[in-house]
Image: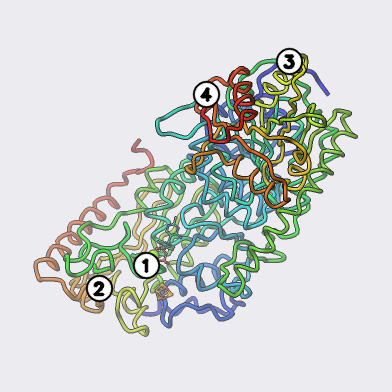
Amino acid sequence: MTLQITSGSKAIAWTAANCGIEVVAAYPITPSTVIPEELSRIQPEHGYEFIPVESELSAISAVIGASAAGTRAFTATSSQGLLLMTEALYNASGMRLPIVMVVANRAIGGPLNIWNDWSDAMALRDSGWIQLFCKNKQEAVDTLVQSFQIAEQTDVPVMVCFEGFYLTHEVSPVEIPDKEKCLSLLPPRKPKHTLDPANPELIGAFAGPAYFQKYKQEQLAEFNNSMPAIEKAAQDFENKFGRKQIPLIEETSLQDADYAVFTMSSLAETTEELVETLRTQGKKIGTLRLKCFRPFPKKLVAAALKNKKGVVVIEKDASSNDQGSLSHDLKEALYENNVQLPVLSCVCGLGGKDVRQKDIERAITELAQGKTETIWL
Amino acid sequence: MPETQTKTAAPTKPQLFSKGHGACAGCGSAVAIRSILFNLGPNIVVSLATGCMEVVSTGYPDNCWGVPVVHSLFENAPAVASGVTRALKKRGSNAIPVVIGGDGSTYDIGFGALSGAMERNEDMIYFCYDNEAYENTGIQRSGATPKYAATTTSPKEVGGKSEWKKNVSFIAASHGVPYAATASIAFLSDLKKKIEKAKAIKGFRIITLFAGCQLGWKHEPSLSIEVARKAVNTGMWNLYEIENGVFHRTVKPKQIEPVENYLKMQGRFKHLKPEQVADIQQRINANQTELDKLETSAVNLSKIL
Ligand SMILES: Cc1ncc(C[n+]2csc(CCOP(=O)(O)OP(=O)(O)O)c2C)c(N)n1
Ligand code: SF4
Ligand SMILES: [Mg+2]
């Protein structure tokens, strides 16, 4: 493992290359642009095929073709690019192709905005892709390695989400998992179905009403059963690299907390720091960070929050239903598990707006005063 | 044109597209697919675009294909095939990557993906089976629909389609691809030669195959080959190849028949007024003159940048 002082995007590109990817197709978009740039620059060292396609729809489509043909295929994108892929993303998961994609999260226009929030990945929350939201660069890099294992074990594609600019552009020390160790976790792909003239198969059939729903039901059941594979990949990585991994959820000072802050991505670091300060003031606040947004670990989340007096959801996305998607999902998880507690949804950080600790603190105060109407920080 | 043209390539090898596909009786496009596969042989990997030929042949649990096929979407087959091509290369396979798409995916919705694959000169053979409309969704106009033809979105009430057909082969040639050709289901030995030539070339090769749809064109199912032959004999469809930028006619009728002979075979042209027929005839005449000039001029289209 080598410690490098570099940007999140370069760290991602180097790690992807170390995972033995065979075909890469990608298209530039801020803030993920440096990932394909770097992958094209280091291609000669690694020997994968790099396809400089003419759009994101073609990027994901080429990756679909490469994956169907049995290779380990990779792409990266953001925002408008991710949404341009939408049709093919549903197609890829429906075809059970173990594609791994990094999404450097960014707002969706209009108005046009290149800065960070989670709206892009949230728009694809029902696309049948596993979605892992990473807290920092190191976690993004480590999760990327695990994602190839998860995808290839489950035949469910994986989206590794990390925040545009805050993490893609931040230059700081990061351990790059070395190739030999990565490859020992990731043996050459052995697809169950592939495109081999010696054994001709059809990948991507047409299915009528007699088969379609049954297929979807099975696909989603397997998708929802992918959590053990996610945990196993984290454990294997931990054993190999000796670095603690969070597969699904992470609790910080939560056990004895009265109130909890529920969040994802780098907002967790902001929140954890705040919680530390509040604890010194005797305020019993804790953090629950969701790493695995899809599939949503409803039981785990509900169990972690069961005895709290209330929960503040801090999220960088807004659905048209006056609150963010994370809040919707949390409420569903609590309801299904008979956990009744006040939830205050906070929409913040849209399009790169600063999220300040004092705003989160104010939200906690308002929740403690009984407020549960969505607030925009 | 010698009638034997259509008889020389009768399939004797095991068919790679069969097993009871659901295409309409007399479907020219199904003839196209069968002929393409017959001439290519089994060592190929097909990326198939959504459309009539996909829908009639891939319905789970059946599969009419004797070769590996990946079907993803309507508009992305050239990109999917780019991934397949690179994967086969990476894995050291010698199978030929092939795309099969209709005119809708080729001329229209997948045009960007096609252009990208051509510009990158991806090492694949692209087949467009051109039945001149979106047949699968119920006969809507496409960029390949001829002027004045009635479709459900260019109905006779508005005088049929108001624009001329695009020429995808010349568009391909201006990308500098090594091989772009037209073909017809009524000229199977010409098709065979073109496929054999394409197989021997590296880089992006595209063959646009005139392959009708009796349902959309509105003629008797038994006439599909006749109609296709008449298209060539009237100059409505021209058989040529553009090899490394150099244009060459592979089949040229000695005498161009009046286009009316072609139009009157099909219900989609039934509403045409004499001046519209004359307009088409004029266009064909001019086109023939220009194609002849091009052939004798030795202009290299791939050098026009
Ligand atoms: C993005 C998208 N838009 C529209 C459709 C509906 N659609 C499916 S096939 C088709 C037309 C296909 O036309 P063509 O490529 O000419 O093939 P044909 O059916 O004529 O053989 C359309 C419009 C689709 N599947 N996907
Ligand atoms: S609608 Fe046309 S193209 Fe489609 S199967 Fe029938 S004849 Fe063939
Ligand atoms: Mg068509």
Residue A352 is tagged as 4
Location of the N terminus of chain B by quadrant is bottom left
Image spot of residue B90 (x, y percent): 69, 45
The kind of secondary structure element at disc 4 is: helix
Q: Is mark 1 within 8 Å of ligand 3?
A: yes
Residue A25 placement, left or right of A274: left
Q: Amino acid at mark 1?
A: Asn
Disc 3: which residue:
A277
| Chain of the residue displaying label 2 | B
Judging depth in this view, the residue of A315 and A190 nearest the camera is A315
Residue B47 is tagged as none
Residue A157 visible to the viewer? yes
Quadrant location, ligand no. 1: bottom left
* Mark 1 crowd level (few <14, some 14–19, many ≥20, 10 Å Cα): many
CA gap, disc 2 to disc 4? 56 Å
Residue B268 is tagged as 2
Query: What residue is drawn where x is 70% and y is 23%?
Result: A269
| Chain of the residue displaying label 3 | A
Disc 1: which residue:
B131
The kind of secondary structure element at disc 1 is: loop
Q: Amino acid at mark 2?
A: Arg
Front tag of 2 and 4? 4
* Mark 3 crowd level (few <14, some 14–19, many ≥20, 10 Å Cα): few
| Chain of the residue displaying label 1 | B
